Amino acid sequence: MLHTLTYPRELYDEYSLDKQLILKLITKHQNGIGKKMFKNKQYYDGEHAIRKKERKGGAPNTKAVCNHAKDISDTASGYFMGNPITYNHTEEDKKMDDLTTAFDNAQLDDVDSDNSLNMSIYGVAYEYIFAKEEKAELIVRSLEPEFTFLVYDDSIEQKELFGVYYRPEKNDVDNEMYYVATVTTENLIYTFNLFGKEKGKIPLTEEPVEHYMGQIPIVEYKNNKESIGDFEQQISLIDAYNTLMSDRVNDKEQFIDAILVIYGSILGDDADETEEAKKRLQDLKLLEMPLDGKAEYLTRVMDETGVETLRKALKEDIYTFSHVPNLTDEHFVGNSSGVAMEYKLLGLEMITKIKERYYKKGLRKRIAILCHFLGLKQVAINPNFIMPVFSRALPKNLTELGQLVANLKGSVSMKTLLQLLPFVEDPDGEIETVGKENEENIKRQKKLFGNKPNDPTDEVVEKEEDDE
């Protein structure tokens, strides 16, 4: 669960911050939620607990990492943000072209993809909106959640006070650790160094810079209400699966290195004969024994059926409790209708709906900042009229969609119908293109049949023009 950092609003002054306060908050973040985030990132990168397992006596020590964590996050984030977000506006306004250009310049598609993956891994994502150097353009960058946090006031509304993005650095001369921190308030940006030796209330000496964003330019996106990662609560199951698979390989290696037991005989009368017999056994696979003697390997009987049953149960639990389907499962693949596929993805769709709801909350802040910045350039756009539209990265049955569009034609606007088709990226442009093609067809028909006074073709053409 993400612990919300708060501070009394009556003690807060964005024009007179306290370095020691920022340092305490960073330390608390590092020792608290930062540890959980770092662990989640390790598991996504394949650094699991099994890698630290040790065995004594030279016994086989396989450290098999089955990275279900990465598979879960990649599947969940790809389903949620595999297709770029599109934006509709409730009012026709030519100034929307300026906002679309601002979206493209800010590289929002890449940022949304990074945010989606961070949400799945860490349980929360952050982005930083800032102006390009020497250019009147905004750019958005995804921040590392393990080094970013927002501070809220202690009221029931929990309004944002300021945001902090920091990175640890080391002074190689005296091996002293310090933080390079960027603190963003509603109007200002501070950049400064924080050393652990600082004591007492030390005011900031660095001069702040105005950012002209209208509000704190760090945006937070939660994965869910508790800010829990998609695989975070399945880490113990992932560890159990890794242990089972590692021990399975260890048993195989121990079976190969099994002890040879000889009954009624010995390899040699002395050390030299014993070594010669061992060499002959290794090279020629030949062992000389009396008629009543016998030899066999001392091995442990392995219950492969029970181990395989346990492996399947653990794997099923990992995906079941994460609500992310195993796309390689034999029960999932196959030719399924759209409705059947939706039932199989019901759990993933439920958690994705939660992601979408919280992401829209962050998008409203992002859009408000972009519109505010455009307002400084005399481009007035109401952010409340802009509606983000999400689409799922899922194979589509184009035949079913085509039938649906044909059945709804005349009852639903053409723009809405075109938005259902995955290969149409710009519905407005597509409508405009179709309109131009119809006009060209009409002109071609006129040129072909001529403009005769009582030609019935003219009536059809005129009727089509009126309908247009």
Image: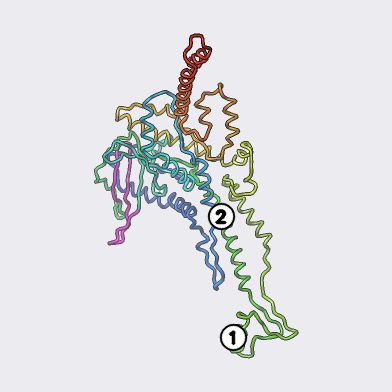
> Which residue does the image show at 59% across and 36% down from the upper left?
397
Q: Considering only vertical position in the picture, is 248 above or below 289?
A: above
Report the Cα–Cα distance between label 2 and label 1: 46 Å
> Which residue does the image show at 59% across and 66% down from the upper left?
250
Q: Considering only vertical position in the picture, is 54 above or below 212?
A: below
Q: Considering only vertical position in the picture, is 430 above or below 332?
A: above
Reading the image, the residue beneath label 2 is: 238
- Image depth: mark 2 or mark 1 in front: 1
Q: Which mark is residue 295?
A: none
- Comparing 58 with 265, the one in front is 265
x then y, percent, for residue 302: 67, 65
x then y, percent, for residue 203: 26, 45
* Part of the protein shown in magenta: 168-193
120 relative to 285 in the view: left or right: left
Q: Which mark is residue 275?
A: 1
Sequence-earlier tag: 2 or 1: 2
